[in-house]
Image (cartoon, rainbow, N blue to C red):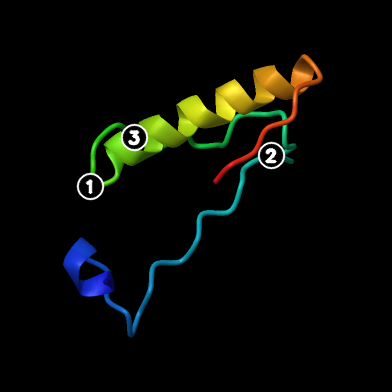
Amino acid sequence: MAPYIGIDHQLPPVPVRPVAPTTLEGPAYPPPGNDGPFARERHAWTGLHAAAVRALGQGSMVVFA
């Protein structure tokens, strides 16, 4: 899969180190761009995450199937 998305599997990219301490409640830094091959998927997962956080805040049970 890596060659199809432009990643050299022999020399993968180095992860970016956070510039400040992170928490689960805080936003990721730096925020991902809206371009690239996975922009639509990132948008969908961001929406699902926001819905799950709201539901759990209300005491609901969330089941991902």
- Left or right, 65 with respect to 20, comes to left
Give me the residue at 69% from left, 39% from top.
20
> Helix, strand or loop at disc 3?
loop
Q: CB under 8 Å between callouts 2 and 1?
A: no
Residue 59 percent coordinates (x, y): 81, 20
The residue type indicated by label 3 comes to Gly
Residue 11 percent coordinates (x, y): 35, 80
Q: Nearer the viewer, residue 8 or 63?
A: 63
Q: Of discs 2 and 1, which sits in the foreground?
A: 1
> Helix, strand or loop at disc 1?
loop
Give me the residue at 24% from left, 36% from top.
35
- Disc nearer the start of the sequence (2/1): 2
- Separation (CA) of disc 2 from disc 3: 19 Å
Examine the rendered structure and indicate whether residue 13 appears above or below residue 61.
below
Tell me the crowding category of disc 2: few under 14, some 14 to 19, or many 20 or more residues within 10 angstroms, Cα based: few
Give me the residue at 29% from left, 35% from top.
40
Q: Of discs 1 and 3, which sits in the foreground?
A: 1
The residue type indicated by label 2 comes to Ala
Q: Which mark is residue 20?
A: 2
- Left or right, 27 with respect to 47, comes to right
- Left or right, 7 with respect to 30, comes to left
- Separation (CA) of disc 1 from disc 3: 11 Å
- Disc nearer the start of the sequence (2/3): 2
Query: Would you name the residue on which mark 1 appears?
Result: 37
Query: Would you name the residue on which mark 3 appears?
Result: 33
Examine the rendered structure and indicate whether residue 31 appears above or below residue 57.
below
Q: Residue 51 falls in which quadrant of the image?
A: top right
The residue type indicated by label 1 comes to Pro
Q: Residue 43 falls in which quadrant of the image?
A: top left
